[in-house]
Structures are given as C-alpha cells and as structure tokens.
Amino acid sequence: MIKKINRRTFLSAASAASTAALLSNRTWSESQKRPNILWITSEDNGPHLGCYGDAYADTPHIDGIAAKGVIYRNAWSTAPVCAPARTTIISGVYPPCTGSEHMRSMTQLPEFMKMYPCYLREAGYYCTNNSKEDYNLEKTGKVWDESSNKAHWRNRKPGQPFFAIFNFTTTHESQIRKRPHEWIHDPDKVRVPAYHPDTPEVRKDWAQYHDKITEMDAQVGKVLQELEEDGLAEDTIIFYYGDHGSGMPRSKRWPYDSGLRVPMVVHIPDQFKDLMPDDYQKGGESDRLTGFIDLAPTVLSLAGIKPPDYMQGHAFLGRFTTPKPEFYFGFRGRMDERYDMVRTVGDGRYVYLRQYMPHKIYGQHIDYMFQTPTTQVWKKMYDEGRLEPPKTYFWETKPPEELYDLKNDPDEVNNLANSPEHREMLEKMRKAHKAWVFRVRDVGFLPEGEIHSRSQGSTPYQMGHDKAAYPLERIFAAADSASSLEMNAIPDLRKAFADDDSAVRYWAALGILMRKKDGLKAAKNEMDRALHDNSPYVRIAAAEALGKYGRDEDAARDIQTLMELVNVEKTSAYISMAALNVLDELGEKAADQKEIIQTLPTQDPSAPTRANGYVSRLIQTISEKQ
C-alpha cells in the first residue's frame, strides 16, 4: 500500500533458450525512449535519514529524491553484511542456494544463470560500476562495460541508455570509529538502542555514524548535480539504498531487522509513468516488502526485459511487476573467521529468527568488529558484571527461535517465541521458513568445505537441486532436531550417527555438543566413534564436545584430533578454520598447542585468498591469548 508523505547438457541449452526468451520479451519499440537507470548506494547504514523521520539526521539530498519519489519502509538487504548482500543483488538468487552465503567465499553460478548486467548489456545498455564488486561468485563473462573508480555514464556512446552504480564507502563501519574526529551531531542527543550500554563511547560512535551519513549525503548530491548538468535528470530513474544495517555491533552481521532493514528511495520521472506501479505517488511511501533479492528482476523489468524464471525475487517496478510477497527472508553464515548459521523471516511487523547454532554466543570475537569502541566497552562491561538484560544478551548463547514485534519492540529485545499469545504467529513463521528452505534448496546446512567438495565438476546450485547428492530432507531433519535443544531428541540424534550422509552425522554430533554434559553422557559411545569418522567436520564437532564436556584424561586425544586437521597444506582452509575455531573455544585445554599453532602454514592454494586470510587471523587470535 502507498501512503502519502538438470544438469550440464540441459543447462547449456537452457542458457541459450533463456537469453533468446529474454530478448524476445523486450517491450520497447525502436521509437520509444528507454530509461537510464542510476543506482546510488552507501555502505553500512540503515534508514537513519530525514525522509524516514529521523529528526537527528541531516540528509537534504536523499530527502530531495524522496520528495519527488517513493520511500520503501520495508526494504531488507537479505544479508546483514556486504559481500553476501551484494552477491544477492548481482545474481538475483539467494546465496544460501548458490553456496555463497559465507563472508568472502567464492563459488560459481550454473551456466544458465547470468549476472543481471549481462542481460542489460545484451539489451543495449551501457553498464558501469563505480566501483566495488566484492561478490562471493565468480563473474560470468563480461559483466560490466566498466567497473572502476573512473566508471561513469559519460563514457557511453552518444544516445546509448545507461545503467550506472555509484557506491559510497563514507559510512562504512571502519569510518564510524576513525579517530580523531570532530563531532557535528551532538553525542548527548543520540538515541541509544535498548541493547547497547549508554556510555560516552557508544554515544560518540552513534553520533559519528550520523556525521558520516551527512557526509555521504553530500556525495549523493554531487552525482545528482552531474545528472542535471548533463540534462539527463528527466530521462533517468534514480534509486538510492544502503547495503545493509548500520556498522554498529548487533546491526551489521546480524539478521535482525536492525541489520537487514535499509533505506530504499526511488524516483521515476513523469515520462516513464507506465513503469510506475498503480499506486505510485510522488512524495509517497510504500509498505510493500522489498529486498535485495528483488533488485535484479526489478531493474530488468524497468529496462523492458522479462526477468528469467530462475530469479527468486519479485519485480516491484516496471513492465513485469509482480504481486507483493507475504514474507521476506534473510540469513547469516560465516562472518569473517567465525562460523554461525541463522535464517530470518519477516512480514513487515514480525521478525522470526531460527538459530541453527544456538550453542554459540551472539558476539563471537570477530577481529574487525572488536576494533569499534562500542564493541570494546560493551564486552568489558559485561565481563565486569556491570550490565543487566537486555544489554547482556549479545554476549550469551542463543535460544533456538526468536520472534519480535517491531511495532511494540523496535529494538528487538523482547523475545516472544515462548509467548502463548503469539503461538500462531510463531507457527506461521516457522512454516514460511521451512517452505523457503526447500523452495530455494538451501545448501547452507552443509559445512562450508562440503559445499565445495560435493560440487566438484558442477556448482553448489546444481548439487543442491540433486536429491542424490544433497538429501536435504534428511539433513534438514537432523539440523532441526539438533538445534532444537530438546532433550527428547537425543534418541533420534544417536540413530543419525549411522546415516550414510556425512552432513546428517555432522548435525548429530553438533546436537550432542549443544546438549553439553547431558548430551555427551547419553551418546558417549557414538561421540567416541565419531572421532574416527571419515568426515573431518564430524570429527571436529565430536572433538569439541568431548574436549569441553568429556573426561580430563581424554583431553589430549581430543586436542590431537583437532591438531591433525589444522594444517591447510594437508587439509583445506575450510577444515582448518573449523578446527582452529574449536581450539580457540577450548582455551586453556589447548594452551600447550600454541607454539605449534603459531608455526602453521596459512595458505591453501585451492582456496580464495580471503579465506586464507581468515586462517591467519584465527592463528593470530589464538597466539595472542594470554
């Protein structure tokens, strides 16, 4: 509502047929003017803008776009961190089904899929990206006409329609903690969310965040001025959006509404009225659920290209607008060097989180995040016992399910998952989540390394859609049971150790680990045998459970199991990261291995450079512990 204010031979044929079908679906006549399309994006900022009602904000240029366009109140980035979010946009499919959900991983798309600029270029558009790419997917052919800090619509052929992106890093997490800084927004007037402690450090970080948004807004104004100077303002559809929630801790990296909700403002000039949805109103706002999963089909729709059927989003503008969805979805996988798995469902008012690794604390030590003063003072106060709920939650383990009512609890601190009055909503969200998992064939239930190993000679997407290679029904059942934390699930988990699929056994071991001493007591024999499983990930999960909750006299055996897997030259970067995370978690029990860990190689030649960087970071973290 708008309110005012399978398989390889088939895939090659499918690729050719898809391209032909898309081109035949162009609806522009030769005499019609096609719109230019401009995307202005900024990093690490939520809808903390004047046009969204933030009285503390100073954003005149973005507010100006909103005054002649529409703001989307319910826009989600799909992922709460940059690379997976950008991967969603460029592909038009959810990263959990292409194996690209993990921060700065690298996988491939099937041959029949293309990154959306390819379709625009085939339709005659000049496509530029200024300048960040940072995808978790290998590029498919020539994606951009130019992708650099010099990329600009001004370099196109005369009269050629353009699609241009300008991405500003001014608001990035690294900039809100950069010192020295002269504050423009008064830290005393900051609104501190309920989950953060109210300290000078926190207030200064939030105020600096708003300062950087104002600085970014001026950069937006410069691009708009260039558009005016070139006489293109009335020929160009303009989008402005942020790439995920704020760079503050518990926003960035976390698939709460605070980490997923983004500003999205769109202006369509009057000459392209036929591309507006029926209820488009200048200076209006929409409560339609939109997200990054929708951007690729939407830009194709605006260019008169029918989005390919494999795209999983919904076009919300243009000639191929679809009915609005009932839910939108988010996710969290590995964040830098730390593993986790969360899936999120939202309907505009309620937000549901399914935690598949509830034994891990929310605020795992991520080196980059801990450079922010807010993170440091928040953790220090928790360790000193100076905080009370809900400010303590971030440093503690998680419930399997969370449900929040944004209308009455915008900071998402009052979990309604156990509320009898909200049981019906909880069930509705659960059902939506499960249906989504099976609809997109979420491969994130595999350990990261198995996403790659099972996809050799193919792609994660194809592997995920092959029921023999990826028996999702059995794997999901094991993961669901394991992460429920219910003690009555132990008999089923014990049986799962006999499954012929390693991922089922992996979740069985994790399920016993999650139940701590009681779980290990009930399944000690299975866990002892799991130390010799042919899957390294099963061995790692078993070693963690036995190392934490088993007998002290067996600790050397459990540590040795992990040490056999940490050398990237003998295993892989993904196995090494998994094992190093457990060694770090075991702390003093693994202290006598520190000297060996310090000398470990850090380069897996088969892994992306950035994945190797996380191996180095874990080794450094363990080495520096007292």
Image (cartoon, rainbow, N blue to C red):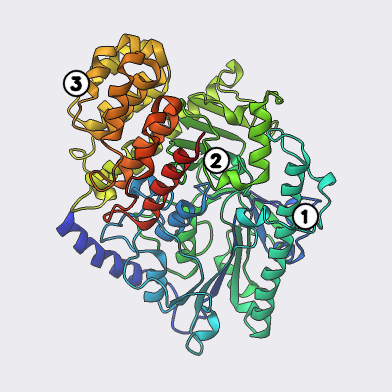
Q: Secondary structure at mark 3?
A: loop
Residue 621 in the image, given as x and y percentages of width and height: 47, 41
Number of the label disc, if any, that sits on residue 57? 1
Number of the label disc, if any, that sits on residue 498? 3
Residue 311 higher or lower than 519, as above or below: below
Marks 3 and 2 sit apart, C-alpha to C-alpha, by 35 Å
Number of the label disc, if any, that sits on residue 254? 2
User: Which residue reaches farthest bottom?
Assistant: 158
Q: Secondary structure at mark 2?
A: loop
Q: Left or right: where does residue 133 sit relative to residue 198?
A: left
Residue 222 in the image, given as x and y percentages of width and height: 69, 75
Crowding at dot 2, Cα within 10 Å, few <14 / some 14-19 / many 20+, comes out as: many
Q: Left or right: where does residue 132 sit relative to residue 501?
A: right
Residue at (60, 23) in percent of width and height? 416
317 or 435, nearer to the observer: 435
Residue 19 in the image, given as x and y percentages of width and height: 30, 68
Residue 448 in the image, given as x and y percentages of width and height: 33, 42
391 or 580, nearer to the observer: 580
Q: Left or right: where does residue 487 sit relative to residue 346?
A: left
Marks 1 and 2 sit apart, C-alpha to C-alpha, by 23 Å
State which tag comes first along the sequence, 3 or 2.
Answer: 2
Residue flagged by tag 2: what amino acid is it?
Trp
State which tag comes first along the sequence, 1 or 3.
Answer: 1
Residue flagged by tag 3: what amino acid is it?
Ala
Residue at (57, 28) in percent of width and height? 403
